[in-house]
Image (cartoon, grey):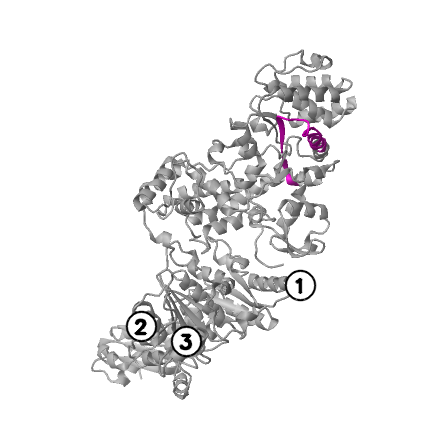
Amino acid sequence: MDTESNPSDSIEKKQMNHSEIKAKITENMSSAHLEIEDLRIQLDQNVGWRIAVISPDFNHKTRSERQKIVLNGLEALTIQWLDLLTPEEKEWAGSLPLDAPIENLPLWPEALARPSHPETILFASDLEDDLKRPIIATFYSLRGGVGRSTALAYTAQILANHGRTVLCVDMDLEAPGLAALFGKENEVQPEQGLIFSLLSLDQGEHPDLRNQIIRISETEELYCLPAGLPNANYARVLNLINPEAWYREDRNPLRELIDILSTELPFKPDVILLDARTGITPLNGPLLFDLADLAIIVFFPHPQTQVGTGALVQALLASHNRRTEPNLTPEPRFIVSPIPASQAPEVIERYRHRSLGWINNWLGSLSDKRPNFEPMVESEITHFIPYRETIATSDRILSAPEYWRDFEPVAEWIEGLLPMASEQQSFVNLAHEKAQILQELQFSGAAAEAQNHLLETFVETDLVQRAIRPDMPLVLGRKGTGKTAIFRRLLEDDQYPSIVVLSPSPLKDGRFWVLSPEAFKEVDQQLKQHQKSWREFWLLQVCLACHLSWQAAPPEPDDALMDILANPLTKELDFINCIENSLSKPRLGLLLHDWLMRFDRDISVQTFLLIDGLDTGFGVGLQEQHIRTESISSLLSLVNDLESNLHRLKFKVMLREDIWRRLKFDNKSHFYGRSVSLQWLEPVDFFKVIVKTALQSHRFKALVQSIEEQQNQGRFLFSSDDFHLTEQQVWNIWNLLVGERMRGGKSAFTKNWVWKRIADGSNHHSPRALLQLFKQGQAWEMREQTKNAYGKTVIRPKALIASLEEVSKQTLDALIEEEFPNLSTLVERLREIGRSPFKSSEVEGLEDELRLASEVGLLSIYEGTNDVVERYKVPDLYRSGIGMTRKGQA
């Protein structure tokens, strides 16, 4: 025996792995000067190894000679399968074992045993380019009775109704029933169905699957490949199905089946929906870990399902599916079903929070493997299906669309991976125009008082139209919702003559009577010194503002006040001196009231008295806030009293909602019905701000108009001066600007993603945050375009994802520095906690700050009630700015 074959030199099996055995055989063949055409090594599923070596140099060598060369030094290995063949012998030898480490097999034992996630995880929804169709979604549940097949069937019906071509495959071989759910069980013929097709493929045949498929709808492209008709022959064939063996050989009937369904049918499926068997069965592993682009996991949040479903999720995240360019991980989605019908909202919420908590924990370490992508939000990849008796007790899916609504979000998950009709229509090549358009776009992230061309981009919603009515003296809103935009709308529009009584500092524009915080402190001292009230100050402020703004010769006050105008008023100090002089006058209130009435009689047209900047005009310290509260209460009380006496002068006071709620003054209720609270209730109105801003770019507007001219389909019908855009026009232009879906991060619709991400804790939306997001996204796109050109839209959706963190920081800074510095202690505590949602016990001792934070949208209640809060949540608008993650459910 050759010394190299000495057993003492053999490497024991337990010391060998796949790569070491491969290296040893390669060394042996090289030493014998034999060429290797193919070498396959695989760990047997029971014990030992499977080895196949193909070499043209095996000609004229006996099997014993071949074995001696190949296994030199490997005699201690337990070998269950050994093929040592020439290329000619390979042709008749049948299937060979795959050359793959066992840990890569998409089978339950291997998948559940994988110790950790891959180095990087890439999902189908992360891609900027479309996946090759069909998209495969596997519906799976660990336990039965949760409506898995029902969810698949209704999802299929919705997708088909949307114009998609859908093929449903009943992979529940042990309990077939999908055809019955579609009402087509009577059409299934003996030896028709999936199980017979798999057997045919396993025997090396190439079956014609056209006759195996049943058409579900005559009007829509909806089809079903049934499992088969359960009978004795079906049971016999079922015993022959061995999916685990398919993944150990070079021919794989299951993958061949998918290839035939994808390419050889009379129709081309957009989507293949796989109905997987409940539990851990041999066939389910490949359906989840290999074939699925989306793995839709259906469960009810009973403790019996928590551990098992969690293990399944970890196995999914450690897998790569059949797609190789690039390597994709099956993407998990969750259906929680059925949520019991209950009259108690807290019962439903308990199920909801338990489910989301589990999913958050299952995905807890995912963000570490996806540093360049937005973290998955458990609420966005989870859908809750309520129990509905009509659906639960029906023998088949119901045809009326009103029964489909519970499953529409599931269909949207799948449709999000398919190209939209708008994306498939190629109008122009953006590559020629994009750089110039990006240079021209001007998304101002500044407050309304600092924006140029505000009126050109002003969006006049129904609420705005109410807000500018003369009979609405009070306009309320959170910071950034548009109060100052309305102020400028009235100030700069010639149709609405106006007088500025108070304005934000950037709009002072030579109006020295618009007081600074230092001046307000001085006024407060003078009022106390002369024992006068803030009511008298505001009367004086209004009269002097009218006097200094009057176009013609202004009405003169009573003789008792004439001396206050003796000295010229040209700067703030002159104005303060004038106020000090006035406050010393007896019966000042009566004299000022009379003067204001003279202004009202003298003017010929209706004129607004504009008051804005009350939130920051007094400063932001505690003492300044106390002065502000007292002053504004007096102002609004005065407005209440004067409104009925003024005929042409009309007050228009812009005020932050949180300040309004804290005010206490007589007859506050008189403003009911005479005030407007600004909110952006409709996304189309909100996003019109961005669309109208983008249309200020001449190149972008020309691009929009050229598309309309080319297609002549009425997509963008507006003239150069007409900005009364229809809803469809807004969405069409939006899609051209930033795309319809969040490709490169999420498969959600772009408009929905933005609407959710820049909402505060009370679901209020700020145009300022929206403009900041697009300003940052524009800058990101300009940088990225030089490295990775993207021609589908002007700004790729991923740019918005990449920009959200900076917008969150800017919005948080504005909230704390400009409005609520007393929330800084709470923000520091939140930074220490580091995750959202969090338990209320973690912020004990900050009750006043928590109340304010909830009021202004920094926090919302995640679990519990207003009286008993169990957990709080920080909205996305502020979460990244604080530095919190969703990782690690509290």
Q: Is residue 841 left or right of residue 130?
A: right
Asked whether residue 834 is drawn in magenta, I would say no
Q: Which of the two residues, 788 or 853, is positioned nearer the viewer here?
A: 853
Q: Which of the two residues, 58 or 730, is positioned nearer the viewer here?
A: 730
Q: Is residue 210 left or right of residue 561?
A: left
Looking at the image, is mark 3 or mark 2 earlier in the sequence?
Answer: 2
Q: Quadrant of the C terminus?
A: bottom right
Label 1 or label 2, whichever lies nearer to me, is 1
Q: Residue 681: horizontal and vertical position, in percent?
A: 55, 46
- The residue that mark 1 highlights is 344
- The residue that mark 3 highlights is 184
| Label 1: few (<14), some (14–19) or many (≥20) C-alpha neighbours in 10 Å | few
Q: Quadrant of the N terminus?
A: bottom left
Asked whether residue 652 is drawn in magenta, I would say yes
Q: Which of the two residues, 868 or 457, is positioned nearer the viewer here?
A: 457
Q: Residue 592: horizontal and vertical position, in percent?
A: 71, 20
- The residue that mark 2 highlights is 26
**From the viewer's perspective, is residue 493 above or below residue 198?**
above
Q: What segment carries the magenta color?
A: 633-657
Q: Is residue 768 left or right of residue 654?
A: left
**From the viewer's perspective, is residue 626 above or below residue 561?**
below
Label 3 or label 1, whichever lies nearer to me, is 3
Label 3 or label 2, whichever lies nearer to me, is 3
**From the viewer's perspective, is residue 157 above or below residue 690?**
below
